[in-house]
Image (cartoon, rainbow, N blue to C red):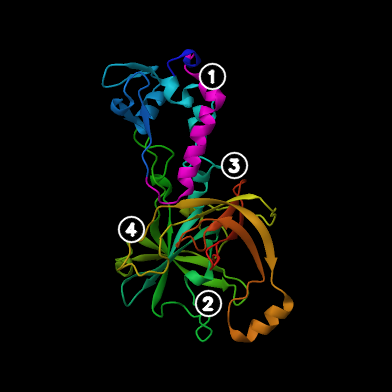
Amino acid sequence: GTGNEGDGGGINIWRGGYELVMKTVDRVMHEFSGLEFIKQAICPHCKQIKKAHTWDWSRILDYVKAQHPTIKCSRNHPVDLRLLSSACHQSSLERNWSSIDIHPGCNGFPIRTLFRGVVLVGLWDRDLRQIAYVGSGFVADKTRGLVVTAAHVLQNLSNPIHFGEMLVKNYIITVGVIPEESYNDQSDGDTIMKPTAMFRYSAEIVVDGGQFMDACILRLKTRFEEDVCDGNTIDELPETILPQDHKSCLKSEKLKQLKMSSKIEPDERIRIIGFNQGQEGLPVRFAHVNRVADFAHGAVIRMFNACDHVRREEETNRVLIPEKEIIVNCGTIGGFSGGPCVNLSGEVIGILSRADTAGN
């Protein structure tokens, strides 16, 4: 960065491949959901690399956004910020701060604009007074308060004797949304606020997929007087019944609705959005409910249609026999079940139902 190629703020370095390398590293790191890592910048003027001054990356971005031309290290070396961040070059896409994705690496519809349409679905056990099961979903109709999620998040689809029964006998279906007022692109400095859901509604199942589809449609029924974080006080809060007599009755709730599409192409890039719980179905008394939305990259492999004779043979066995499935290659974690699978246009093409039991 201090040689001839560094002239002009190192633009030749960035164009010569360094920017591609940095974006690739970012993409790889963010592919691993839940992985913690630290990004730093190193002073190019410090001679001994082991003793070189480092900055936290958030500080570099603060200086870039404030349009400072240089930053000084602890040894008083003035460093041209254009050497440290490609955002200083007008030719870089990073210069447009409003278009930055929360997680870089997947071109297409910005993921942050979709988070508010994704919901956290919990099954609250009245007897244990806690959320016993949790999954994800998305708002399919904002005016009528309709939410789509995976049926197995709420119902027993694995036991033929109790097929279709709720996982908890005495229950409340709770729906958590990401509040509009608390989720902005930027907060203090360059720290991006995490898309954190709050339990706000109770819901009821209005349609389920029965034996042939791991999906159900929920309708928001009541709103809690206060947003709930951990779910332990849900049965103590007063509730307001949401009107159901008009298709636009829930406009005041300002829900974010995701668009849907039936067009699916092989090798199409996709993202699955949800709330990573690590061990889906684990009672909350043993595990913390993660309320921060996350996503994973992947691609469509193929479509799968069940044969008619297979459906006929299994109809009497009371087990799940999906009529149609989209097979994708995507590394997801427990808690994503029911979460929307979106294409690069931000359209929902399906929801996450199950994973390959062989782990492939």
**Three-letter amino acid code of the residue under disc 4:** Cys
Cα–Cα span, label 1 and label 2: 58 Å
Q: What separation in Å lies between label 2 and label 4 (alpha carbons)?
A: 28 Å
**Camera sees residue 208:** yes
Q: Which residues are magenta?
A: 7-36
For disc 1, the marked residue is 12
Q: Closer to the camera: disc 4 or disc 1?
A: 1
Q: Nearer the viewer, mark 3 or mark 4?
A: 3
Please, is residue 24 above or below residue 331 in the view?
above
Q: Give, as a three-letter code, the residue at label 3.
A: Gly
Question: Which is closer to the viewer, label 3 or label 1?
Answer: 1
Q: Quadrant of the C terminus?
A: bottom right
> For the residue carrying disc 1, how many other residues have a C-alpha within 10 Å: few (<14), some (14-19), or many (20+)?
some
The residue where tag 2 is placed is 157
**1 is higher (above) or lower (below) than 132:** above
**Tag 4: Cα neighbours inside 10 Å, few (<14), some, or many (≥20)?**
some
* Residue type for callout 1: Asn
Specify which label sits upstream in the sequence, 3 or 2: 3
Which residue bears the numbered disc 4?
229
CB under 8 Å between callouts 2 and 4? Answer: no
